[in-house]
Image (tube, rainbow, N blue to C red):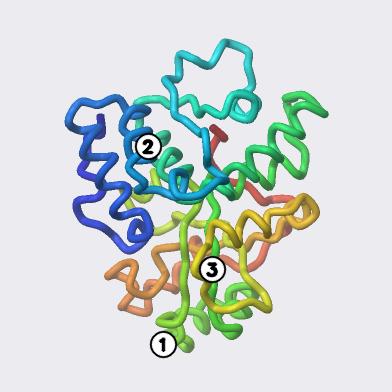
Amino acid sequence: MPALDVFGAEPPWLQPLSALGAQVESAWRAGMTLPDALNRAAMDGMGGLAATGAGAGMRFVPQAVLARGMPYEGFIYGTGTVPTRENLHDFFNGLIWLHYPQAKRRLNALQAGAIATQGVGAVRGPLRDAVTVFDENGAVLFAPRELREALAARAWRRLFTDLRPLWRQARLEIFGHALLEQLVRPRKPLTAHVLLVPDAPESVADVDAWLAGALQPGRLEAKPFTPLPVLGVPGWWAENENFSFYDDSSVFRSARPASQYTTGVPPR
């Protein structure tokens, strides 16, 4: 069970998962296994998994069910079950499965298909690498054009100070479960790899459905993500009210070659 009261403080990045996360965490802290707590939330209709056909049949099972040597993604695709450990990493992975079932199924299908064709291998290849980046560390930003352009250009001062009022019109949702786990203990360098939404409404009612349609192989292989230090988002961290927060060039960096693109965390 978790050592921390993760949803007690309800920081801004957890708001989309708030009701769902609080229910699962409460059951887990009370002694229920994490797979059972996630399954109960699904049955109660707290997450998208229970509410949409895309998630029908998906269940969480103990990690011990995954046989040695069986690829994790292939097992999920073949059985409709998610092996789940009793830790925060898999807690957040489960919440993302419940909240964004269509997008998670899409990523799983892409991973499983690539593994079936190419094997696991020491090198994942461009598609599996991009899927892993987004699955572990991704986010999606619906925002006015000016914000999207400033972020794409890594124009940090313009993005966070000159255009600060426009952030009230923006919507950033974190998808990556590894990033959510790291944000349990927030640190200034924590960075999401953001999928920007060009030529689209500034927000959508169903981010899950939008993502499921947007996560196409060709688009992913082109590595369309833009790094965003998430604690720089206005309203997400008190320290960024002092604009000197953004002068740290070790965090707010200029553009770098795509070949250096990495999650910084191992896949699960």
Q: Are marks 1 and 3 in contact (CB under 8 Å)?
A: no
Residue lying at 44% horizontally and 73% vertically, measured from the top left: 247
User: For numbered disc 2, what is the local secondary structure?
Assistant: helix
Residue corresponding to mark 1: 165
Residue lying at 29% horizontally and 70% vertically, measured from the top left: 239
Residue corresponding to mark 3: 141
Q: Is residue 63 left or right of residue 9?
A: right
The image quadrant of residue 214 is bottom right
Please name the amino acid that badge 3 sits on: Leu
Nearer the observer, 122 or 76: 76
Where the N terminus falls, by quadrant?
top left
Please name the amino acid that badge 1 sits on: Pro
Nearer the observer, 203 or 48: 48
Nearer the observer, 96 or 78: 78
Q: Are marks 2 and 1 in contact (CB under 8 Å)?
A: no
The span from disc 2 to disc 1 (Cα, nearest Å) is 34 Å
Q: Which mark is residue 91?
A: 2
Residue 53 x %, y % = 55, 46
Q: Is residue 72 left or right of residue 258?
A: left
